[in-house]
Amino acid sequence: MNMFRTTLLGGLLLSSGYAAAVDNIFSGGKVSGELRMAYIQKKPRVSEGLSTSDLAAGGILKYETAAWQGISGGVAFYTAHSLLRPEADRFDDELTSPTQGYDLLGESYVNYDYDALHLRYGRQVIDTPFADSDDIRMTPHTFQGTYASYGMDALTFHAGYLTRWQGVDTGFPDGDNSFVPLTQGSKGMAMAAVTYASDQLEAGVWYYDLSHVARIWYGDVTAAFQIADEMTLHTGLQGTHQSDATNEETRCVLGCSGVKGSLTGAMVELETSRFSLDAAYNHATVKEGNTLFGGYGGGPYYTNMYITTAHEFAVNQNCTSFTLGGMLTPVDGLAFGYRYGRFKGENVYIVPVHDILLEYQAGKNLNLDISYVMIHDGQNPTSSDYNYDQAFARVIYSF
């Protein structure tokens, strides 16, 4: 009888302990989010083009549990809807979707953390060279899959496998199809990397295997040199080599092109507390019938601008691009920026681009960013593809 009472009491205490632990997982969780409002207008520089615009509201509501035995989780609801709801031929769908709105479960993941090991499975925000959030519209890109990292002093080892994604670059499909394959016909993308970070030097080597599309090696190194009080010189080198793995289906999706070529680049930036000046250069080598992969999201190339990317014109031809820019911070929290880019294909396209930027941070919770982009195709002035101005403004309130 005493043994029975002891076992029963132990069971009750154990149950009580588990109940308390479960209660702490949720009661110790954290709610966060953002309210966002944005306006966009695109005005073609050709006479037959129509201006498009939209004003949208939305944001992110996120909940993360507290950890138990290294296990935690999180969910985030994303939403954006057009407020103006213009006619179809005057509607710009970059803020919302072709149906002028979306509601989706953008993040839904489980974490496991043990010492320097971090493992996440599910829908998640990821920022790597060729898969990143690229959060320049109403909500960021997110990816479905597994991602792990392990830190060892200045080294970090990365591994992952992604199968699907969502965001402005996917067109925001509706309902259960909000997450689409990375590339139609591909089973997903495996990745592995090792990165190094210290006060003066950062470097990384990445390998991506995108099934039925490409095998990609990428590496970069950046160094910082203190040349005077509050003045730092940043320099960087990057390179990628890509080999083709397309099949009949994926080659058709990619515009009847294979993925094969290389790209190298260099950058330099002089930074002080009140201003910065930067310059960057990329050269892509691509043979007839091929193109380069630029990544899911913003991409890693140094001459990528707000809209235009270094690999964009590297289709069936070599391409060279360079950028020059600067940022002025007259007072804390306020910054003005300008960047000029020139993208020249070996056979076609000479495209100058101008990015004008303004960023303002009011305290910890309120942010404003404004951009004005001017693109002009000097070789095809009557084409609307690269002859337009685009204005964008976004306000974010975080809580």
Image (spheres, helix red, strand yellow):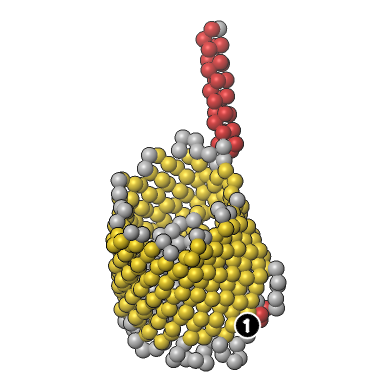
Q: Going 49% across and 70% down the picture, which residue do you hit?
A: 336
Indicate whether 96 appears above or below 284.
Answer: above
The percent position of residue 316, horizontal first and vertical second, equals 36, 83
Q: Going 36% across and 89% down the picture, which residue do you hit?
A: 347
Q: Nearer the viewer, residue 44 or 247?
A: 44
- In which quadrant of the rendered view does residue 23 lie? top right
- Return the residue found at the far top: 1
Indicate whether 42 appears above or below 383.
Answer: above
Q: Secondary structure at mark 1?
A: loop
Number of labelled discs?
A: 1
Using the rendered image of the protein, determine whether residue 73 is visible from the camera's viewpoint. Answer: yes
The percent position of residue 294, horizontal first and vertical second, equals 41, 71
Q: Nearer the viewer, residue 188 or 386?
A: 386
How many neighbours does mark 1 have within 10 angstroms: few (below 14), some (14-19), or many (20 or more)?
some
Q: Nearer the viewer, residue 321 or 112?
A: 321
Using the rendered image of the protein, determine whether residue 173 is visible from the camera's viewpoint. Answer: no
Is 69 left, or right, of 192 in this rendering?
Answer: right
The percent position of residue 12, horizontal first and vertical second, equals 57, 20
Q: Going 56% across and 11% down the picture, which residue do you hit?
A: 5
The percent position of residue 25, horizontal first and vertical second, equals 55, 36
Residue on which disc 1 sits = 51
Is 383 left, or right, of 84 in this rendering?
Answer: left
- In which quadrant of the rendered view does residue 287 lie? bottom left
Is 317 left, or right, of 368 in this rendering?
Answer: left
Q: Quadrant of the N terminus?
A: top right
Q: Nearer the viewer, residue 234 or 180?
A: 234
- In which quadrant of the rendered view does residue 86 lie? bottom right
Q: Amino acid at mark 1?
A: Ser
Q: Going 32% across and 69% down the picture, which residue do you hit?
A: 268
